Image (cartoon, rainbow, N blue to C red):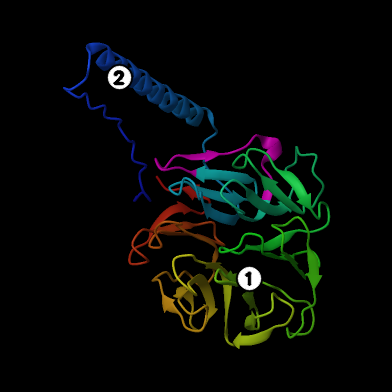
Amino acid sequence: MKKVGLTALGTALFILSACAENTDDIEVSMHNGAEATTQMQETEEENIEKTELREKVTSFMHIHGLSYDPLQPDILYVGTHHGLFQIDEHNQWHWIAPEEERHDLMGFNFLDDETMISSGHPAAESDLQNPIGVVTSKDRGGSWEPVALHGEVDFHVLEVNAGNSEVLYGVDAQEAVLYRSFNSGSDWEKLPWTGLPEGEVAAYAIVSDPEDPSSLMMGLPQGIFHSSDSGESWELMHEGMTLSIGEGSMHGEGVVTAYLLGEPSGLMQSRDFGETWDPLNLTLEHNDAVMQLAVHPENENIITVGTSQEHLYQTIDGGENWTMIAEAGEPVS
């Protein structure tokens, strides 16, 4: 299989000048250089040891979120029904947390460089209420703390604006209620379904424009709807097609990657926030659809998607070629 990338290991080079005033300076430089090299080796050995101690992923159920690490973008995190795991730059698959922190993470994503955010249901060994509301992690998924709506909502759809992480949107799966937050998820307000079809609303996905967080698209069975006022009112944008997942991108103005259902269908990319779409050469079987996706933060040609049949596919060339890296919930060796 193809790897997303490799982290380059830098080597420190100490240049000893022939113009040094005395040999003591040279000896000190050599000593410091040796110490630095030893520390680097010890750190690398510790990281390898920690990786070896973590539980390897042999199978998983339900892909509820995908996100590349913003600080270490060659690491991919996968939120599942039984917790969070990572795929590192060496293609090692490991569960992140102890059993009591392996929650059913719905809508998993990064809120900022240091904070993960999610919703869903608690692990069997957890003391958290069900549903868990909005939870965050400051230790890359090792532990989770409730920050809002604990025991109240289950956001199956949770959108963090890519350009302004203070702006979030969520749809509660229990009551089909739309929420929004303007302070990174600490406080939320309910919104009416103004302009949307009557009856219970089944929202597949929400994606917001990184350049304009008040501009939204939402995928419903009846089509793609657009809001220009932060979700307060909606109008039909496209009939006969909808989106099962979408992600706004900082790689260009109006760039959205999404999986479309209907006509057209397949994985698509738009550069005018959903007005027009271009295919990314991934069309699945009729009983499968992309439910989660992640675009590499430094290279828009690297995309990973997760499907309803628990497959993971990855491209490193903007969709020209795709590699299956997990099949039916099991890593492909």
Across and down, in percent, residue 68 comes to: 50, 52
Disc 2 to disc 1, C-alpha distance: 56 Å
| Above or below, 220 relative to 143 | below
**Kind of residue sitting beneath label 1:** Ile
Amino acid type indicated by mark 2: Ser
What's the residue at 57%, 74% (across, down)? Answer: 243
Q: Which residue is mark 2?
A: 29
Q: Is residue 122 visible?
A: no
Q: Is residue 191 magenta?
A: no
Q: Which residue carries the number 1 mark? A: 206
| Residue 114: x %, y % from top left | 59, 45
In the foreground, 237 or 202: 237
Q: Which quadrant of the rendered structure holds the C terminus?
A: top left
Asked whether residue 287 appears in the rendered view, the answer is yes
- Residue depicted at 66% across the width and 42% down the height: 102
Depth order, front residue of 253/201: 253
Between label 2 and label 1, give the one nearer the viewer. 2
Write the start and end of the magenta stretch as one range.
87-104
Estimate the x, y position of residue 263 in percent, counting from the top left.
50, 84
